[in-house]
Image: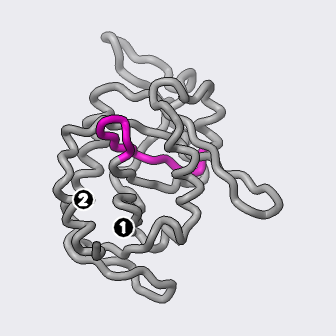
Amino acid sequence: MDNQQTLKNLKEVDLDACDISLAIIKEYKKQRVSQYNASYVPVNEPVEIKLRRIMASHINNANTVEEYSVDCPEPEEDEVRVISYEDTDFIKIMEKLIPLNPEEDIVTDVDELVRAKSYVIVLRQDGDIKAIGFRILPENWKMKKAKGFIPLMYKDNRFEDLDSNPVFSIANTIDFVFYGGKLFILSKKSFE
């Protein structure tokens, strides 16, 4: 199947019929070779809705496909670059994700979240991974404190101190989408 047809098939996936989950990816080096671990992070329904919108937005905006190469330019807004996932380190991440159960193989403490290098939005249908959105995290994805301000959250008719609760942010963008053995690259810079 050619890349344009694979993208067309991705666009036809009923995202509302898929279960959605979030997982973090931790990277470490073993003899200078990247190794990966993955853990799921439970999310509530409002977060699931936002994650689904992120995936839908990027999938729907992609209309043209060009083969990825090292010297190709950054994709335009409606364009994606494509490469087989087997030609990348993403195959190692898939090997870690496939056997995991999103309800059982979850993070155990906040330090795991802080040490994450990336996160993935996983769409499953009938228990099988259908598509994945991947995003590299900034060096410190934990909320940064603004000088001169006290971070507060309004909850139950009162302000609560955010310093006592870890706060993390998820971007409205993803770097690439995995589907049908292909990586559809939205950000060449982040992908590389």
* Residue 59 to residue 144: above or below: below
Q: Nearer the viewer, residue 134 or 92?
A: 92
Is residue 49 on the magenta stretch? no
At x 48%, y 65%, the residue is: 85
Residue occupying image coordinates x 52% and y 44%: 97
Q: Are marks 1 and 2 in contact (CB under 8 Å)?
A: yes
Identify the amino acid type marked 1: Phe
Q: In 3D space, how far apart are the residues under numbered discs 1 and 2 (Cα atoms)?
A: 10 Å
Q: Residue at x 79, y 56 (%)?
A: 30
Please provide percent x and percent y for residue 133: 38, 53
Name the quadrant of the N terminus.
Answer: bottom left
The amino acid type, in three-letter code, at marker 2 is Leu
Across and down, in percent, residue 47 comes to: 32, 33
Q: Residue at x 54, y 28 (%)?
A: 106
* Residue 144 visible in image: no
Above or below for 35 versus 62: above
Reply yes or no: does residue 119 show up in magenta.
Answer: yes
Check disc 1 and report its element: helix, strand or loop.
Answer: strand
Q: Nearer the viewer, mark 1 or mark 2?
A: 2
